[in-house]
Amino acid sequence: DPPYARMAVHGEALMSGIRELAASHGLPLRVQGLPMAFHASFGDPEPTWDHSGVLTSDAARYAAFAHLLADHGVWVASRGVWMVSAAHSDIELAAALERLDAALKAFTR
């Protein structure tokens, strides 16, 4: 049971779920990076490859969203970094996506 392979699968599923939920709520959330440690930000959903692309994101909006996520039981860095652990399983994935959906509903009100 190689942990890094499990982490990659978990991270890909989480990234995909975040993208799908954000789109279902009509929010322009960019999610990119490695499955074990990726970045999310508000702005153009197309990937960014340099610092000028990062500057197009709405960092203040994402920081407010990160605080709301914490209120819903999902801790992420307010700068947009999400981390996946070998301890995360399908249970944590389902819980994170459920809580993310609730936070997105509250955020778009």
Image (spheres, rainbow, N blue to C red):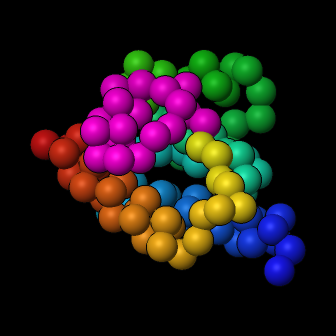
Measured from the top left, where is residue 84 in percent x and y? 65, 53
Is 69 a magenta residue?
yes
The answer to which quarter of the image holds residue 109 is top left
Image position of 50 (left or right of 63): right
Seen in the picture, residue 103 relative to 53 is either above or below; the reply is below
The answer to which quarter of the image holds residue 13 is bottom right
The structure residue drawn at horizontal position 58% and vertical position 48%, both measured from the top left corner, is: 31
Figure label count:
0
Measured from the top left, where is residue 100 in percent x and y? 36, 54
Seen in the picture, residue 1 relative to 103 is either above or below; the reply is below
The structure residue drawn at horizontal position 75% and vertical position 72%, both measured from the top left corner, is: 6
Measured from the top left, where is residue 3 in percent x and y? 81, 68
Image position of 3 (left or right of 22): right
- Say which of 91 and 25 sits in front: 91
The structure residue drawn at horizontal position 60% and vertical position 19%, both measured from the top left corner, is: 55
Is 37 a magenta residue?
no
In the rendered image, the quadrant that contains the N terminus is: bottom right
Any part of residue 46 in sight: no
Residue with the most extreme left position = 109
Image position of 61 (left or right of 4): left
Residue with the most extreme bottom position = 1
- Say which of 60 and 72 sits in front: 72
- Say which of 102 and 108 sits in front: 102
Q: Which residues fall within the magenta stretch?
A: 63-81
